[in-house]
Amino acid sequence: MRRGALIGLGNVALHGHLPGWRRRRDVEIVGGTDARPEQRTVLVAHAPGTRWYPTTAELLSEASLDFVDICTPPASHAALIRSALERGLHVLCEKPLVGARDDLAPLARLAEKTGRVLYTVHNWHHAPIVRRTTELVDEGRIGRVNHVVWHTLRTRPASAGDERGGNWRVDPAVAGGGVLTDHGWHVFYVVQRWIGAPPLSVSATLERRRHTGWDVEDTASVRVTYPEAIAEILLTWASDVRRNWAEVRGTTGVLELRDETLVLKGDARGADLAWSCPPAMSDGSHHPDWFDGVANQFLAEAAGTAPRGANLAEATLCAALERGARASGLDGGREVPLSEVLS
């Protein structure tokens, strides 16, 4: 039985992670903490018997734990990860894993030194339509992937609780960035899985199309160049509709992801095929049904029954792509070599 604790008790923790942990028979969530004292009542309501700790320091020093699950806003991640690793705990953390450029490498070294797992919640890998797309790509049903187009359309950022103090997702000091930070990370690791080869460069245009009073971008147009492929990504909080759409083009066919419907075109085996893959990618923002796969892989790494490092390598690439896209956006959309941001 693995003993874990939640750090940060917002919507993602309570409605995404906690239900997944409570479904398991090999994990017990024994503690929780949040910077907001009023979340104590919420924790008791969602997980009776789970102990409340007023501070993270008290939780880490007093609770008998195997791991922590960090669900706080991005600006706090690096310090919390460091504290947990120094206590000898495995760490599961929401994306983006870190915000500052120089935080990731020292944390990766600390995880290696302590022999603990540092794992980012890459839950979109486990969306039914994404998982099925990956299977078809791996089976060679569309040949070698050479072009991906991805659109994430939203009318606003995901809710951050009651928002009496505003939505932290549009505060750059807390979130690190806008829609590129919030949604780009997911797209980067999903597209990377389909294309396979490491990217060479990235360029981007970052805009405030509708929410001009914000200090973060509400729209990002990103182009990632690979040795034999291109990914074109549109992310926006300024749409009139909520929708996800993607096209994965290969040398022998095309896969089209229409929210919850996957269509295979041009397959050599015959007519176009379609699969229903509910729920839709745009259905909600917590995705508790996608968490089981994340937990399984995290616990397998922690137990030593799965190789370590693939998820952390994905996170490293996602962080580099975001840094490169931001550098490009500040420099008129120039193409930024990945070597420039990985060095």
Image (spheres, rainbow, N blue to C red):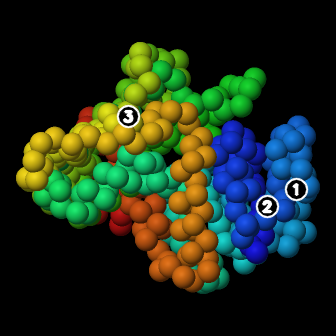
Q: Nearer the viewer, residue 255 or 185?
A: 255
Locate residue 194, reporting x and y percent: 28, 57
For label 1, the residue is: 50
Residues at marks 2 and 1, CA–CA distance in whole angstroms? 7 Å
Give the residue displayed 43% in from the left and 48% down from the top: 128
Instruction: Give whichever of discs 2 and 1 has the lower sequence position.
Output: 2
For label 3, the residue is: 259
Crowd tier of the residue under label 2, counting other residues whose Cα lies within 10 Å: few below 14, some 14–19, many 20 or above: many
For label 2, the residue is: 29
Please, is residue 313 above or below residue 271 in the view? below
Crowd tier of the residue under label 3, counting other residues whose Cα lies within 10 Å: few below 14, some 14–19, many 20 or above: many
Q: Residue furthest front?
A: 270
- Give the quadrant of the C terminus: bottom left
Residues at marks 2 and 3, CA–CA distance in whole angstroms? 33 Å
Locate residue 284, reporting x and y percent: 55, 33
CB atoms at circles 2 and 1 under 8 Å apart? yes
Name the residue type under label 1.
Thr
Residues at marks 3 and 1, CA–CA distance in whole angstroms? 36 Å
Give the residue displayed 37% in from the left and 49% down from the top: 130
Secondary element under disc 2, as helix, strand or loop, is: strand
